[in-house]
Image: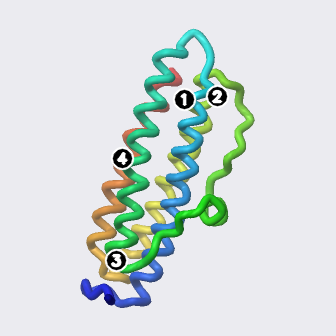
């Protein structure tokens, strides 16, 4: 059944493409955060192990929300690892060691990349697609990432 929620098909297709890129970024970031959780070493192991776990749990909720937003506007979700890797702006590779500060620096960069992408999406949508639901959704998503990256940055001091 066709989705009839007041957004032109061509507009919802563009919004869906934007959201699919964000979804891919979120998936890669969640995976990298799990890697940090599993591989962190050092004197702060226990606290950072728990910290990274809380972060990837939050990212997993975000992933589900983004996927459901894509479905709500009438499109299918790209849900393969190959598809995510072709869409993401992030990289799986990291050059830092297994100390918490190395993981945190890498994750900070990824969160900032996602925040910038979300801002680009919001600017692109402003007045163009008349998809106020996605505007509201992505604004909230941006705020979540801003809080998460603040917590990561604060851990480096």
Marking on residue 144: 4
Marking on residue 102: 2
Depth check: 13 or 145 in front? Answer: 13
Mark in the foreground, 2 or 1: 1
Q: Which of pointers 3 and 4 lies earlier in the amino acid sequence? A: 3
Mark in the foreground, 4 or 1: 1
Q: Secondary structure at mark 1?
A: helix
In screen coordinates, is 139 left or right of 84?
Answer: left
Callouts 4 and 1 close, C-beta under 8 Å: no
In screen coordinates, is 153 left or right of 41?
Answer: left
Q: Distance from label 2 to label 3 (Cα)?
A: 38 Å
Q: Residues within 10 Å of mark 4 (few under 14, many from 20)?
A: some
Q: Residues within 10 Å of mark 1 (few under 14, many from 20)?
A: many
Above or below for 71 versus 154: below
Dividing the picture into quadrants, the one containing residue 67 is bottom left
Q: Residue at x 58, y 23 (%)?
A: 100
Q: Distance from label 2 to label 4 (Cα)?
A: 22 Å
Q: Quadrant of the N terminus?
A: bottom left
Q: Secondary structure at mark 2?
A: helix
- Return the residue at label 1: 37
Q: Position of residue 5 (x, y in %)?
A: 25, 84
Q: Which of pointers 2 and 3 lies earlier in the amino acid sequence? A: 3
Q: Which of pointers 2 and 1 lies earlier in the amino acid sequence? A: 1
Marking on residue 73: 3
Q: Secondary structure at mark 3?
A: loop
Color scheme of the displayed model:
rainbow
Q: Residue at x 61, y 31 (%)?
A: 103
Q: Distance from label 3 to label 4 (Cα)?
A: 22 Å
Q: Distance from label 2 to label 1 (Cα)?
A: 12 Å
In screen coordinates, is 89 left or right of 9?
Answer: right
Q: Position of residue 56 (x, y in %)?
A: 46, 39
Mark in the foreground, 3 or 4: 3
């Amino acid at each position: 059944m066709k989705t009839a929620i007041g957004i032109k098909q061509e507009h919802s297709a563009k919004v869906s493409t934007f959201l699919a890129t964000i979804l891919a970024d979120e998936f890669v970031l969640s995976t990298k955060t799990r890697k940090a959780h599993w591989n962190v070493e050092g004197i702060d192991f226990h606290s950072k192990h728990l910290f990274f776990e809380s972060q990837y749990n939050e990212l997993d909720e975000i992933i589900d929300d983004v996927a459901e937003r894509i479905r709500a506007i009438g499109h299918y979700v790209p849900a393969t690892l190959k598809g995510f890797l072709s869409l993401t702006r992030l990289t799986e590779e990291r050059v830092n060691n297994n100390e918490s500060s190395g993981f945190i620096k890498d994750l900070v960069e990824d969160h900032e990349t996602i925040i910038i992408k979300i801002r680009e999406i919001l600017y692109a949508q402003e007045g163009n697609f008349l998809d106020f639901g996605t505007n509201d959704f992505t604004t909230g998503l941006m705020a979540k990432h801003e809080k998460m990256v603040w917590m990561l940055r604060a851990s480096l001091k």
